[in-house]
Image (spheres, grey):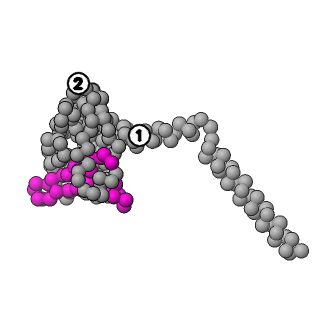
Amino acid sequence: MSMRFTERARRRMVALTMAAGLALGAVGCGGGGDDEKPDTSASASKDRGSAPSAQEGKSEAPVAELKGRDGLLLQITSAQRDAGGFLTVNGQFKNDGSGSVTIPAELRGDETEILKHGTSLGGATLVDSKGKKRYYVLRDTDGRPLTTTGLTTIESGQTIPVFIQFPAPPASATDVTLQVPTFSSGTIKISG
């Protein structure tokens, strides 16, 4: 009798587990409203549109503007330290030229590990002249640079939000020089 009871209990537990799994799956697949959410977050993370545009609203002019080829500009809107020891530089590419411009592949630099991950701002560096140090773009555990990636072309008049993360210089460093391959360099003020 105890064997029958155990077998029934086991069947009920399996059925209950399957029912709970199906219910969770149905909730996760939900109606049309849930389908909208991934698209919104994917586009925000893909182009980092929300953070830079909020920054732009706070200041009318960029804190630095680096000039590239064919009318391509890199406008820096902020450089902020965070509690984790990082410095995030936010900005946007702007095409001031009359035609479509290809984002230069040289922006990614020439480090083998970064080259594997496509077009990015992985070649950017920060120079702390006072502290006599150069900072390179951070990477994740797979070697991907912590910058905007997947940059291809930009149409005339268009802007594309971008970000770059570096190790944070010491608190005494308030002004640093941002260097990006194929662009003029520019001094930016660190906040935070």
Q: Name the amino acid, label 1.
A: Ala
Q: Name the residue under label 1.
A: 44
- Decide which of 162, 107 is in the foreground and name it: 107
Of the numbered discs in the image, which one, if any, rests on residue 35?
none
Q: Name the residue under label 2.
A: 98
Q: Position of residue 18 (x, y in %)?
A: 71, 56
What is the secondary structure assignment of the residue under circle 1?
helix
- Decide which of 54, 75 is in the foreground and name it: 75
Question: Taking the image as drawn, is residue 108 in sight?
Answer: yes
Question: Taking the image as drawn, is residue 77 in sight?
Answer: no
Name which quarter of the figure residue 85 lies in.
bottom left
Q: Position of residue 28 (x, y in %)?
A: 61, 46
Q: What stretch is highlighted in magenta?
A: 118-144
As for residue 129 lying within the magenta part, the answer is yes
Q: Where is residue 48 in the image (x, y as percent from the top left)?
A: 36, 41
Q: Is the magenta stretch mostly helix, strand or loop?
A: loop
Q: How crowded is mark 1: few (under 14 residues within 10 Å), some or many (20 or more)?
A: few
Identify the residue at horizontal 30%, vertical 32% (top origin). Answer: 154
Classify 3 as above or below 22. Answer: below
Identify the residue at horizontal 64%, vertical 49% (top origin). Answer: 25
Q: Residues within 10 Å of mark 2 (few under 14, many from 20)?
A: few
Q: Where is residue 101 in the image (x, y as percent from the top left)?
A: 26, 32
Identify the residue at horizontal 73%, vertical 54% (top origin). Answer: 19
Name which quarter of the figure residue 55 lies in.
top left
- Decide which of 149, 12 is in the foreground and name it: 149
Q: Name the amino acid, label 2.
A: Ser
Horizontal relation, residue 82 to residue 5: left or right: left
Which of disc 2 and disc 1 is earlier in sequence? 1
- Calculate the distance from the C-alpha at mark 1 to the C-alpha at mark 2: 27 Å
Classify 133 as above or below 1. Answer: above
Q: Residue furthest top?
A: 98
